[in-house]
Image (cartoon, grey):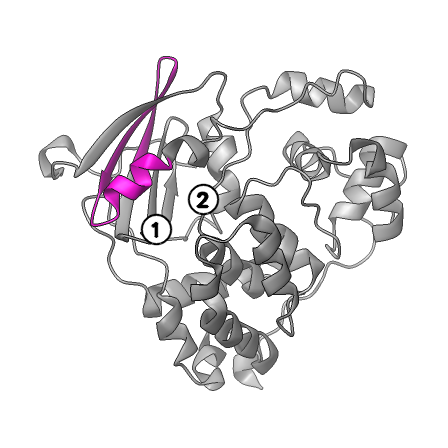
Amino acid sequence: MSSKPAVSAGDEAPPDAAAFVEVEPLDLAATMAPLAHGSGDRTIRLGRSEVWRATLTPDGPATIRLQRVDRGVSVTAWGGGARWAINHAAELVGATDRPPSFADGHPLLAAIARAHPGVRLPRTNRPFEALLPAICEQKVTGREARAAFQGIVRAYGQPAPGPGGLRLPPEPAVLADRPYFAFHRFGLEQRRADVIRRASTLAPRLEGRPAAEVERLLRAVPGIGPWTVAEVLRVSFGDPDAVSVGDYHIPSLVAWALAGERRADDARMLQLLEPYRGQRGRVQRLLEISGIYPERRGPRMAPRDITRQ
């Protein structure tokens, strides 16, 4: 995670919009980390006290820079969607999030919450931008998923406005028009390629809809299940209860942290998380950043290379 500035002051174009968001406490890097998909993700740059992000807003493309300052975040933005990005910056950095203390919960969970009071749940308000990488991540290794998403961005994303050197996420219409085999070079088999194409066609209907309606629309798409829906709701709507049912690692993480059990399935995970209903996704996030993982036993999931098939 680099803390170097994205551009030098002399190269910086004047922003199209600027604002200050008051929020304390805030761990900016940890809060924004779920929006990044590997160190090669060109749509975002994470630093300890500065984050750059490119996005396609309803008003046009935008680059937004978040700089941690005293009592909050200084926000600047470039592009046709700059004003929209500024207006939603408070949600993006979790200023509207209300993390509980978990003081009445598991002692370990309460300790993690005390140790990380600045970790908040971001809300991007961009469902498709969360959906695309989530589809890439379905039932594959993290390395495969990151390579697929980053390849799609390099091939079909446009340069983001303003300084920063980022790329925009691809326009859904561009992906919807691609044949399934166009995604093969990114390591995506026909199943996930078809899901991306169907989701891209659906993307305009997701705009401005409440979370419950977006969830209903997504669940009706073949190839989109509970895991993918949870990833979208947690990132695009800041849903604190969106838990990753169907994840390869999360059930065992939850079981190990809350019950000292090395292995667990989804049913056991949900049983352990039931006392935290309404905040189950937040519990998952806190456990993820805690580093409390059971010792790995058995083989890891092996990556595949479908480009050689």
The tag earlier along the polypeptide, 1 or 2, is 1
Amino acid type of the residue that numbered disc 2 sits on in the rendered structure: Thr
Name the side, left or right, on which 275 lies relative to 236: right
Q: Quadrant of residue 305?
A: bottom right
Question: Dot 1 corresponds to which residue?
Answer: 55
Residue located 67% across and 45% down the image: 242
Quadrant into which the C terminus falls? bottom right
Q: Quadrant of residue 58?
A: bottom left
| For the residues bearing labels 1 and 2, Cβ distance under 8 angstroms | yes
> How far from the left and from the top, in percent, is residue 271?
88, 42
Given residues 6 and 302, the one toward you in this image is 6
Amino acid type of the residue that numbered disc 1 sits on in the rendered structure: Thr
Q: Quadrant of residue 167?
A: bottom left
- In reply to whether residue 260 is colored magenta, the answer given is no
Residues in magenta?
65-88
Question: Dot 2 corresponds to which residue?
Answer: 124
Residue located 49% across and 62% down the image: 132
How far, Cα to Cα, is label 1 from label 2? 9 Å
Res 309 visible = yes
Residue located 73% across and 58% down the image: 300
Q: Helix, strand or loop at disc 2?
A: loop
- In reply to whether residue 77 is colored magenta, the answer given is yes
> How far from the left and from the top, in percent, is residue 179?
44, 85
Q: Helix, strand or loop at disc 1?
A: strand
Give the farthest residue toward the left: 10
Q: Against 187, is 181 above or below?
A: below
The numbered disc on residue 134 is: none
> How far from the left and from the top, in percent, is residue 8?
17, 34
Name the side, left or right, on which 38 lies relative to 255: left
